Image: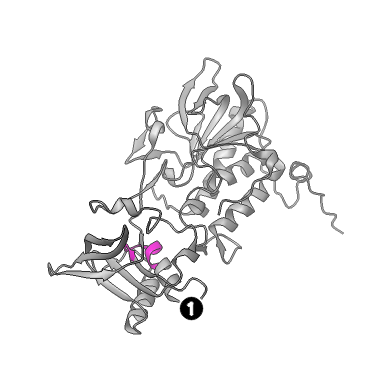
């Protein structure tokens, strides 16, 4: 399900001798990190991107590659994979270098103002600026706490949907009360190539963290006997010949019911882990990096944080907010990268200079 990258932009510096000298290092190749490449590129700032995953796209690819996204401006609907592919195409003119499957392990300020950056694979950089676009950090799905059930992970127990076809025609149980749980529940209930044989949604309470419209749709499907909803928590399971066959669900009435299961999807959200970023000396509040709202700079000048990993008054964790933050962060970084250069706001619709940077012809107006 990973998007295909242009071979010219994948790990281009793998065999580089000595530290790579660059204008910017972006930590995180999710949608906001990819758009950061674009905004920096418009200002002629060259970037390298580091990501712990083996491919670009971040949470969009890792957690919901096929889930529709409706709040990208001018794009009525797209999937996480489609959004990632479009962003990769958009940043092609800037020739960014990607370094996948590695985390930043060392960040040290140098006497000349630059940062020495080293990754877990030994890739080294000397960079003028750093942009942290790591989503919720090195994230891991919160797991189902039932003794022994982990042995079914990746065969019958899943925390994300990579291949919807494997749930088709199966007795499916979905656990969770957020948008992801309800979205996928309805996806597998409705007629289509991925329709399950049966779907049971389990949540510990009757209230949901999902959009009210989705909750109403789910309850309508229950009323039509298209699916079931059970209030309770999974407290055990039964197996046969090494296969998970039934779940024990204990309700608020303390009664334990047994439900059949072929496949189990669990959506408890993500457990954010900042990892080595927590040791960089940044001002951190509840595992999020504190930034200003002028440049989205952190407490260390030259280090910026954009997207879900940052926090400031009024912060909203939306992709479109991250795009806005990336634009202002790029302008904030320009005086650091080019201290003797005056930065002017130009528009991609009319600027011949930006057209040249983008590799497109300037339009001729009568």
For this orientation, the residue located farthest to the left is 254
Residue 203 in view (yes/no): yes
In depth, the one of 178 and 351 nearer the eye is 178
For this orientation, the residue located farthest to the top is 111
Residue 216 drawn above or below residue 157: below
Looking at the image, residue 126 sits to the left or right of residue 225; the answer is right
Q: Quadrant of residue 137?
A: top left
Residue 143 in view (yes/no): no
Looking at the image, residue 168 sits to the left or right of residue 327; the answer is left
Q: Which structural element holds mark 1?
A: loop
* Residue 248 magenta: no
- Which residue is tagged 1? 191
Span shown in magenta: 174-182
For this orientation, the residue located farthest to the right is 366
Report the quarter where the C terminus lies.
Answer: bottom right
In depth, the one of 312 and 131 nearer the eye is 131
Residue 363 drawn above or below residue 16: below
Where in the figure is residue 151, as x and y percent of width and height?
32, 51
Where in the figure is residue 72, as x and y percent of width and height?
55, 59
Where in the figure is residue 346, as x and y percent of width and height?
69, 45
The residue depicted at 52 percent of the width and 73 percent of the height is 193
The residue depicted at 18 percent of the width and 68 percent of the height is 251
Looking at the image, residue 21 sits to the left or right of residue 211; the answer is right
* Residue 180 magenta: yes
């Amino acid at each position: 399900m990973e998007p295909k990258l242009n071979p010219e932009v994948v790990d281009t510096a793998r065999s580089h001798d000595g530290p790579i000298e660059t204008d910017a290092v972006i930590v995180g190749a999710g949608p906001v990190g990819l758009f950061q490449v674009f905004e920096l590129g418009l200002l002629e700032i060259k970037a390298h991107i580091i990501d712990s995953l083996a491919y670009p796209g971040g949470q969009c690819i890792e957690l919901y590659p096929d889930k529709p996204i409706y709040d990208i401006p001018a794009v009525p609907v797209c999937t996480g994979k489609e959004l990632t592919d479009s962003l990769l195409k958009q940043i092609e003119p800037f020739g960014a270098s990607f370094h996948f499957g590695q985390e930043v392990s060392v960040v040290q300020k140098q006497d000349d103002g630059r940062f020495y950056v080293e990754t877990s694979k030994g890739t080294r950089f000397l960079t003028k600026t750093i942009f942290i676009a790591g989503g919720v950090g090195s994230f891991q799905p919160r797991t189902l706490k039932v003794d022994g059930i982990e042995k079914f992970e990746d065969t019958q127990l899943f925390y994300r949907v990579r291949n919807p076809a494997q749930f088709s025609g199966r007795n499916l149980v979905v656990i969770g009360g957020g948008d992801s749980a309800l979205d996928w529940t309805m996806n597998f209930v409705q007629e289509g190539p991925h329709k399950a044989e049966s779907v049971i949604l389990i949540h510990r309470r009757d209230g949901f963290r999902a959009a009210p419209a989705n909750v109403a749709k789910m309850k309508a499907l229950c009323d039509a006997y298209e699916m079931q909803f059970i209030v309770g928590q999974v407290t055990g399971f039964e197996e046969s010949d090494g296969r998970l066959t039934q779940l024990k669900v204990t309700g608020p009435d303390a009664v334990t019911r047994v439900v059949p299961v072929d496949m189990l999807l669990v959506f408890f959200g993500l457990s954010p882990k900042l990892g080595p970023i927590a040791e960089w000396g940044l001002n951190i509040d509840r595992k999020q990096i504190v930034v200003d709202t002028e440049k989205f700079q952190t407490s260390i000048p030259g280090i910026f944080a954009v997207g879900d990993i940052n926090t400031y008054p009024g912060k909203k964790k939306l992709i479109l907010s991250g795009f806005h933050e990336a634009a202002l962060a790029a302008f904030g970084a320009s005086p650091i990268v080019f201290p003797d250069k005056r930065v002017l706001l130009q528009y991609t619709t009319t600027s011949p200079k930006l057209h040249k940077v983008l590799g497109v012809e300037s339009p001729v107006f009568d």
